[in-house]
Amino acid sequence: MSRFALLSSVCALSVVTLDTSLAQSSSTQSGAQPLPPVVVNQPNQQRRRATTAPSRTPRARTAVAPRAVQPPRTNVFVESPRGPIQGYVANRSSTGTKTNTPINETPQSISVVGAEQIRDQKPRSFDDVLRYVPGVAAGTFGADFRNDWFLIRGFKSDDNSVFLDGLQLFYTSYASWKLQPANMERVEILRGPSSILYGGSSPSGLVNVVSKMPRAEPIRYVETGVDNYGNAYFGFDINTPIKLAPGNGELYTRVVGQVQNGGTQTDFTPNNNYFIAPSLTWKPNVDTTLTILGSASYNETRPAQFLPYVGTVTNAPFGRIPTSFYGGDPSTDSFKREQEMLGYQFEHHMSDNVTFRQNARYAHVDVNYTGITVGDGVAFGNSYANVATGDLKRYGFATRGIADQGTLDSQVEYRFTTGILSHTALFGLDLKTYSINDTQGTNPAYPNINALNPTYSAALPQIRSAPDFNNYRDGSQTQNQLGLYLQDQIKLDRFTLVLSGRNDWVSNTRFDLGGGGSTLSRDDSQFSGRAGLIYNFDNGLAPYVSYATSYNPVVGLNFSTGTLLLPETGQQAEVGVKYQPVGFDGHFSFAYFDLKRQNVLTTNPLNPLQSIQNGEQTSRGLELEAVANLAPGLKVVGSFTTYNLFVSKDGDATIIGKVPTNTPRQLASAWADYTFQDGILRGFGFGGGVRYVGGSFADNINTLSVPSRTLGDLAVHYDWQNWRFAVNANNVTDEIYVANCSSANACFYGDRRRVTGSIGYKW
């Protein structure tokens, strides 16, 4: 942890140097602005005059006028990229630049899902939040509650491209993280390479979840609900401003939590979630904000089953396997996750033009997963013992993954002018450290099961105590990453040029008892960059162009060479148009991109249980999005996505030009929600949406197709005094479909109809 201390010292030194040498500059930047405090619509705070003690040590500022006193509090909504949005329309974001920048001035594709849209659509999990976002295929493993699964621009992104409050939540193996929709203020989706500012992540983009932060206004809200599978929940959101003695600043606290328990569409498979997320914000003065964020959660379910293509996508001799079928055994199977996080966000305005920010978090997760799985244990080989009768083979699998991640990101933002150019420069250092202890093994000593008439036995041996249990992985790996990044947002009249560059230094060390007790290490250094240009016409039209490269360290072993895996790299060119009509509360966007991902893990032709690193995948396509608050009470979102996605390089020549498995190439969605504002129906509202997910393939040579599906969602709600009553129905027509097949013997059913009734109360 000494590198954290060194990093903090370097950042502090750089801030002092900048503040001394640059304080005489002034800023005329109208686009990017200092990130406002996490509190929105805050009470009037005036800088203390000579009659009171100064809030900080005075400094000479010969060319800088004093900062204006904040105006009195009004009902005018001031959007912060760390806070809520009005309706469905977000106008500002910090995910694309790490500064407070209008979305219409950012030369890259960005979508934002706010808490109001999340409330209206009632998602059951984090990946459900992304169902109506362009370029994102969500829920790719269907009714599997272990993790949140999604692709961005055709590439898997849930393992390395989930960020919480601007800091990465990386996972590998089975030690995954779980985020709760009830604690999400907004979810920002940045499409295209993002490692320029954030370090290792997928070249396809990232998803940044902004937590619900303490606010100046009191919030007291509780909600309970239950669905048609008997899965019930109770949640609360309590925000309390605390009155301090004069001169001690302002203090706000917030606690968000939820208890969820009950069944799902799959027999013997619960979806139990328990979490609590306390936070505290202290503002000693108008220039300084410190927010401390904590959370703890526990999730419990059972593993999803790897079902064969024949019997799910197509008919077997006996017909189809029921969607409620559970192929394991409730006496032995479990999936449990314990997760804790603690971090802070610190911001200090050192002058009118220089802002220092530091964000940090420590996260710990412990996943214990044991299960009897359909298949023969050889890369999900032939699942049937007798396809005519529906008898399925099974084997035992067990894993324990314990991971720790520490992240520290320090930034200095400096706003200045050079002649006719105005600049928002960002200087940053971040440090990431990740370690995992990982054990995985199999046991073939389990009897077959019939898909139509399954029987379960409490007499089965416990998986961990079986004498012939084979650990094929048993070891640990540590990855440390230090990144230095620079960015300048340069404005000339209506032009905005964004130049970003970053260099990462990464070290990996792996110890593996399963590999004979060997220790391997690897050090890498890589530069990534971005250049983007956007022009804002007076009528709200904003064409843009950008080019970016990416760099993503990969944790794991290349079994073909016996060495640690190489980092993935990527490049993308993108052109697009954003349109935000004057006087219109909404925006439209179009983007065309050409994206390549290199050093991709592929299946070893000599051993299908292993992966090798010799692939390249190309994704070319276009995305369209529309989001608007059309009228009081009427909110809409819509999107369309189409790709030309294919394998452009691989050791297996037969799959070059083919589409990777589990990858739909067309997506479309639309959602609208309306609430009556006047009359006898005031407070009554309804909403509905349609989602289309194109077909995909279950094999690498694209001979086994998985059909497309079109699903409908409905919502009815009524707000009366302090109460809110709602009924939400997902997949309202109860369509039975296969969400994904990663191979011919690893298919997963999608969500059946789920109807949720809920009652909320605020006071």
Image (cartoon, rainbow, N blue to C red):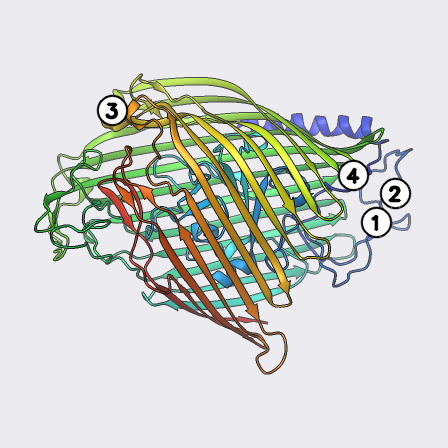
Callout 3 environment at 10 Å: few (<14), some (14 to 19), or many (20+)?
A: few
Number of the front mark, 4 or 1: 4
Tags 1 and 3 touching, CB below 8 Å: no
Query: Gap in Å between the C-alphas at discs 1 and 2?
Result: 10 Å
Residue most extreme to the bottom: 680
Residue type at mark 3: give it.
Pro
Tell which of 307 and 596 is nearer to you. Answer: 596
| Residue picked out by circle 4 | 29
Nearest to N terminus: mark 4 or mark 1: 4
- Looking at the image, which is closer to me, 130 or 70? 130
State the residue position of label 1: 47
Height in image: 69 above or below 723? above
Gap in angstroms between the C-alphas marked 1 and 3: 68 Å
Q: Is residue 281 visible?
A: yes
- Going by the numbered disc 2, the residue's amino acid type is Pro
Q: CA distance from mark 4 to mark 1?
A: 23 Å
Cα–Cα gap, marks 3 and 4: 56 Å
- Looking at marks 3 and 4 on the same chain, the residue that comes earlier in the sequence is marked by 4
Residue 493 - label: none
Say which label, 3 or 2, has the lower sequence index.
Answer: 2
Where does residue 58 sit, x and y in percent of width and height?
85, 37
Type of amino acid under label 1: Arg
Do the numbered discs 2 and 4 sit on residues whose CB atoms are within 8 Å?
A: no
User: Residue 335: where, in percent of width, then height?
Assistant: 30, 48
**Disc on the earlier residue, 1 or 3:** 1
At x 25% / y 20%, what residue is drawn?
516
Q: Is residue 693 left or right of residue 84?
A: left
Mark 4, secondary structure of its residue: loop
Q: Which residue is mark 3?
A: 605
Q: For the residue labelled by badge 1, is the local secondary structure a helix, a strand or a loop?
A: loop
